[in-house]
Protein backbone atom coordinates (compact mmCIF):
# COMPACT_ATOMS: atom_id res chain seq x y z
CA UNK A 1 0.00 0.00 0.00
CA UNK A 2 2.68 2.52 1.00
CA UNK A 3 4.87 1.99 -2.07
CA UNK A 4 1.79 2.59 -4.20
CA UNK A 5 0.79 5.71 -2.25
CA UNK A 6 4.28 7.19 -2.51
CA UNK A 7 4.71 6.35 -6.21
CA UNK A 8 2.99 9.57 -7.38
CA UNK A 9 5.28 12.45 -8.27
CA UNK A 10 3.68 14.70 -5.65
CA UNK A 11 4.47 14.12 -1.98
CA UNK A 12 1.46 12.34 -0.46
CA UNK A 13 1.71 14.25 2.84
CA UNK A 14 3.46 17.32 1.50
CA UNK A 15 7.04 18.44 2.06
CA UNK A 16 6.48 20.66 5.11
CA UNK A 17 6.92 19.24 8.62
CA UNK A 18 4.06 18.28 10.88
CA UNK A 19 2.84 21.38 12.77
CA UNK A 20 3.15 19.84 16.23
CA UNK A 21 6.73 18.78 15.52
CA UNK A 22 7.64 22.17 14.02
CA UNK A 23 6.30 23.96 17.10
CA UNK A 24 7.92 21.64 19.66
CA UNK A 25 11.12 20.19 18.19
CA UNK A 26 13.14 22.39 20.56
CA UNK A 27 12.02 20.08 23.40
CA UNK A 28 14.33 17.43 21.90
CA UNK A 29 17.95 17.70 23.09
CA UNK A 30 20.50 18.38 20.35
CA UNK A 31 21.97 15.16 19.01
CA UNK A 32 20.69 11.98 17.40
CA UNK A 33 17.02 11.65 16.47
CA UNK A 34 15.15 8.61 15.17
CA UNK A 35 12.04 9.26 13.08
CA UNK A 36 9.63 6.31 12.93
CA UNK A 37 7.57 5.53 9.80
CA UNK A 38 9.10 8.58 8.15
CA UNK A 39 7.61 8.01 4.70
CA UNK A 40 8.75 10.62 2.19
CA UNK A 41 11.02 12.51 4.57
CA UNK A 42 9.27 15.77 5.44
CA UNK A 43 9.83 15.52 9.21
CA UNK A 44 13.32 14.00 9.05
CA UNK A 45 14.51 16.67 6.62
CA UNK A 46 13.05 19.41 8.82
CA UNK A 47 14.91 18.04 11.85
CA UNK A 48 18.15 17.73 9.87
CA UNK A 49 17.76 21.38 8.85
CA UNK A 50 17.58 22.27 12.56
CA UNK A 51 20.95 20.60 13.12
CA UNK A 52 19.94 17.16 14.38
CA UNK A 53 21.64 13.95 13.20
CA UNK A 54 18.56 12.14 11.89
CA UNK A 55 17.91 8.47 11.15
CA UNK A 56 14.63 7.83 9.33
CA UNK A 57 13.03 4.38 9.30
CA UNK A 58 10.31 3.31 6.93
CA UNK A 59 9.07 0.11 5.28
CA UNK A 60 8.64 1.77 1.87
CA UNK A 61 11.65 1.94 -0.45
CA UNK A 62 9.64 4.29 -2.68
CA UNK A 63 9.00 6.68 0.21
CA UNK A 64 12.65 6.64 1.28
CA UNK A 65 13.81 7.40 -2.26
CA UNK A 66 11.65 10.53 -2.18
CA UNK A 67 13.03 11.32 1.29
CA UNK A 68 16.55 11.18 -0.17
CA UNK A 69 15.53 13.58 -2.94
CA UNK A 70 13.98 15.97 -0.42
CA UNK A 71 17.13 15.87 1.74
CA UNK A 72 19.32 16.62 -1.29
CA UNK A 73 17.05 19.49 -2.28
CA UNK A 74 17.58 21.04 1.15
CA UNK A 75 21.28 20.25 1.32
CA UNK A 76 21.07 18.02 4.41
CA UNK A 77 21.95 14.43 5.20
CA UNK A 78 19.52 11.92 6.65
CA UNK A 79 20.38 8.30 7.33
CA UNK A 80 17.63 6.27 5.67
CA UNK A 81 16.80 2.77 6.91
CA UNK A 82 14.45 0.42 5.06
CA UNK A 83 12.86 -1.70 7.78
CA UNK A 84 9.57 -2.97 9.15
CA UNK A 85 8.99 -1.49 12.62
CA UNK A 86 7.73 -4.90 13.75
CA UNK A 87 11.32 -6.17 13.41
CA UNK A 88 13.43 -3.02 13.83
CA UNK A 89 15.62 -2.87 16.96
CA UNK A 90 15.71 0.62 18.48
CA UNK A 91 18.90 -0.15 20.42
CA UNK A 92 19.78 1.04 23.93
CA UNK A 93 20.78 4.52 25.11
CA UNK A 94 21.22 5.60 21.49
CA UNK A 95 18.84 8.46 20.85
CA UNK A 96 18.42 11.99 22.14
CA UNK A 97 15.00 12.04 20.51
CA UNK A 98 12.51 9.66 18.92
CA UNK A 99 9.67 11.05 16.80
CA UNK A 100 6.41 9.34 15.82
CA UNK A 101 4.10 11.37 13.57
CA UNK A 102 0.93 9.59 12.43
CA UNK A 103 2.49 6.14 12.65
CA UNK A 104 -0.40 3.65 12.34
CA UNK A 105 0.70 0.27 13.70
CA UNK A 106 -1.23 -2.85 14.72
CA UNK A 107 -1.71 -2.82 18.51
CA UNK A 108 0.74 -5.64 19.26
CA UNK A 109 3.48 -4.03 17.17
CA UNK A 110 2.78 -0.61 18.69
CA UNK A 111 2.90 -1.93 22.27
CA UNK A 112 6.20 -3.70 21.60
CA UNK A 113 7.67 -0.59 19.99
CA UNK A 114 6.49 1.65 22.83
CA UNK A 115 8.02 -0.72 25.40
CA UNK A 116 11.39 -0.31 23.64
CA UNK A 117 11.34 3.50 23.65
CA UNK A 118 12.60 4.24 27.17
CA UNK A 119 15.56 1.85 26.92
CA UNK A 120 16.43 3.28 23.48
CA UNK A 121 16.52 6.90 24.67
CA UNK A 122 19.53 8.41 26.37
CA UNK A 123 18.88 9.89 29.84
CA UNK A 124 17.06 13.18 29.25
CA UNK A 125 16.01 12.02 25.77
CA UNK A 126 12.58 12.95 24.46
CA UNK A 127 9.81 11.08 22.66
CA UNK A 128 7.46 13.28 20.60
CA UNK A 129 4.26 11.91 19.08
CA UNK A 130 1.16 13.00 17.24
CA UNK A 131 -1.44 10.39 16.32
CA UNK A 132 -5.10 10.17 15.45
CA UNK A 133 -7.54 9.12 18.16
CA UNK A 134 -10.49 6.79 17.46
CA UNK A 135 -12.72 9.90 17.35
CA UNK A 136 -11.00 10.59 14.01
CA UNK A 137 -13.34 8.00 12.45
CA UNK A 138 -16.10 10.62 12.76
CA UNK A 139 -14.11 13.16 10.72
CA UNK A 140 -12.89 11.18 7.70
CA UNK A 141 -10.02 13.61 7.08
CA UNK A 142 -7.18 11.07 7.25
CA UNK A 143 -5.85 8.11 9.19
CA UNK A 144 -7.84 5.32 7.57
CA UNK A 145 -10.82 3.52 9.03
CA UNK A 146 -9.37 1.29 11.75
CA UNK A 147 -9.59 2.44 15.37
CA UNK A 148 -7.08 -0.30 16.25
CA UNK A 149 -4.16 1.72 14.83
CA UNK A 150 -5.23 4.92 16.59
CA UNK A 151 -4.19 6.02 20.07
CA UNK A 152 -5.50 7.90 23.10
CA UNK A 153 -3.91 9.65 26.04
CA UNK A 154 -4.94 6.64 28.16
CA UNK A 155 -3.26 4.13 25.83
CA UNK A 156 -0.10 6.24 25.76
CA UNK A 157 0.01 6.49 29.57
CA UNK A 158 -0.33 2.72 29.72
CA UNK A 159 2.22 1.89 27.00
CA UNK A 160 4.96 4.50 27.49
CA UNK A 161 6.40 3.05 30.67
CA UNK A 162 9.64 4.55 31.88
CA UNK A 163 8.88 7.99 30.42
CA UNK A 164 7.61 11.15 32.16
CA UNK A 165 5.09 13.29 30.29
CA UNK A 166 5.83 16.96 29.70
CA UNK A 167 2.71 17.26 27.51
CA UNK A 168 -0.19 14.90 26.83
CA UNK A 169 -3.42 16.12 25.26
CA UNK A 170 -6.31 15.01 23.08
CA UNK A 171 -7.69 17.79 20.91
CA UNK A 172 -9.37 18.82 17.70
CA UNK A 173 -7.18 20.65 15.23
CA UNK A 174 -6.90 21.36 11.53
CA UNK A 175 -4.36 19.00 9.98
CA UNK A 176 -3.40 19.95 6.43
CA UNK A 177 -0.59 17.70 5.20
CA UNK A 178 -0.85 16.75 1.54
CA UNK A 179 -3.92 15.06 0.10
CA UNK A 180 -4.31 12.32 2.71
CA UNK A 181 -4.45 14.48 5.85
CA UNK A 182 -6.70 17.43 5.14
CA UNK A 183 -9.20 19.04 7.49
CA UNK A 184 -10.39 19.10 11.05
CA UNK A 185 -9.05 16.09 12.95
CA UNK A 186 -9.09 14.39 16.36
CA UNK A 187 -5.53 13.88 17.56
CA UNK A 188 -3.48 13.02 20.60
CA UNK A 189 -0.14 14.77 21.18
CA UNK A 190 2.60 13.71 23.56
CA UNK A 191 6.03 14.87 24.64
CA UNK A 192 7.68 12.61 27.18
CA UNK A 193 11.22 12.25 28.45
CA UNK A 194 13.49 9.68 30.07
CA UNK A 195 14.71 10.80 33.49
CA UNK A 196 18.37 11.76 33.56
Image (cartoon, rainbow, N blue to C red):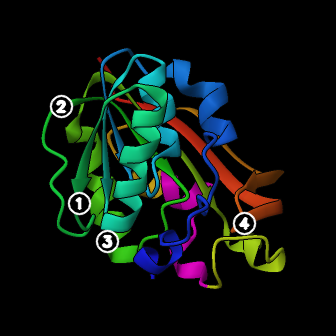
- Asked if residue 147 lies in the magenta stretch, the reply is yes
Can I make out residue 15 in this image? yes
Q: CA distance from mark 1 to mark 2?
A: 19 Å
Q: Circle 4 — which element?
A: loop
What span is colored magenta in the figure?
146-156
Q: Is residue 145 above or below residue 19?
A: below
The dot on residue 82 is 1
Q: Nearer the viewer, mark 3 or mark 1?
A: 1
The residue depicted at 30 percent of the width and 53 percent of the height is: 57
Q: Nearer the viewer, mark 1 or mark 2?
A: 1
At label 4, counting other C-alpha atoms closer than 10 Å, the crowd grade (few under 14, some 14-19, many 20 or more) is some
The residue depicted at 29 percent of the width and 45 percent of the height is: 117
The dot on residue 112 is none
The dot on residue 109 is 3
Give the mark nearer the N terminus: 3 vs 2: 2
Give the mark nearer the N terminus: 2 vs 4: 2
Amino acid sequence: MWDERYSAEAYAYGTEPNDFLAQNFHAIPRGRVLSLAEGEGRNAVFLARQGYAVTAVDASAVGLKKAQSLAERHGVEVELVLADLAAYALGENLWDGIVSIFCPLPPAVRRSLHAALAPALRPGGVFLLEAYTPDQLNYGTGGGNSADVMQTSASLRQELTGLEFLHLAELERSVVEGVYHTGLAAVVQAIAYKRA
